[in-house]
Amino acid sequence: MTFQFAPKYAEEVANAELANVDRSFMEAGTHIIKIEATICIESKNTGNDNVILEASIVSTDSTEHKPHEPVKHIWQLSGCEKWKRERNMRQIKTVVAASLPADTPLSAITSDIVGKAIDGGDESVLVGALIKVICKKKTSKNGRDYLDYSFLRAPEAQNQEFPSTPPESWQADDDKADDKEGAEPIPF
């Protein structure tokens, strides 16, 4: 027996959120990733604030990943030790800096710039940026193994099908451009 999907379910589906992509955490290796979204969520279990970087692998030297594989990285911003929160803040700033035009001075990374980079989900201005991520296996003083993440500007010369950094969303509007010699303007 068959049934008519519309109108019984059509409106409900149209109003539903899209299903999440199943993403792996980045494993040890050196990866070039393309940012697809930045999501700010409050954990349902702990109430902690977290930022999730969603991306896809462009290239990697790891046997754990392959090109086009969806990956993620999570930074906890509340409910954690002070040193961890500070490290996470530094890493987020590094991701933002790595996505800006190459000659952008660090003093230009204001709270407004960071907010526009981290807020917005798949509309974030970071979407499309290429970032190099180095994940190294390390052992803590207590003998526990962990992954240490470093975030860098991706090499400019990539023979990939993806655009190079910075993403178009960082490109300046003519009326807002700042004509400092030798530096590309930030678009705000």
Image: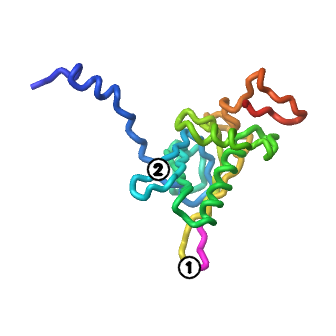
The residue depicted at 81 percent of the width and 33 percent of the height is 184
How far from the left and from the top, in percent, is residue 3? 15, 23
Query: How many residues crowd around disc 1 within 10 Å: few (fewer than 14), some, or many (20 or more)?
Result: few
For label 1, the SS is: loop
For the C terminus, which image quadrant?
top right
How far from the left and from the top, in percent, is residue 9? 24, 26
Q: How is the image coloured?
A: rainbow
Along the viewing direction, whichever of 164 and 160 lies nearer the viewer: 164
Mark sitting on residue 42: 2
Residue corresponding to mark 1: 143
Amino acid on which the number 2 mark rests in the picture = Glu
Furthest-left residue in this view: 1
Along the viewing direction, whichever of 54 and 14 lies nearer the viewer: 14
Circles 2 and 1: CB atoms closer than 8 Å: no
Amino acid on which the number 1 mark rests in the picture = Gly
Please report the bounds of the magenta region as a residue range.
137-141
Residue 180 lies in the magenta stretch: no
Furthest-bottom residue in this view: 142
When asked about the image quadrant of residue 1, the answer is: top left
Q: Main secondary structure of the magenta part?
A: strand
Give the answer, above or below, for where 68 lies relative to 62: above
Q: Upstream in the sequence, badge 2 or badge 1?
A: 2
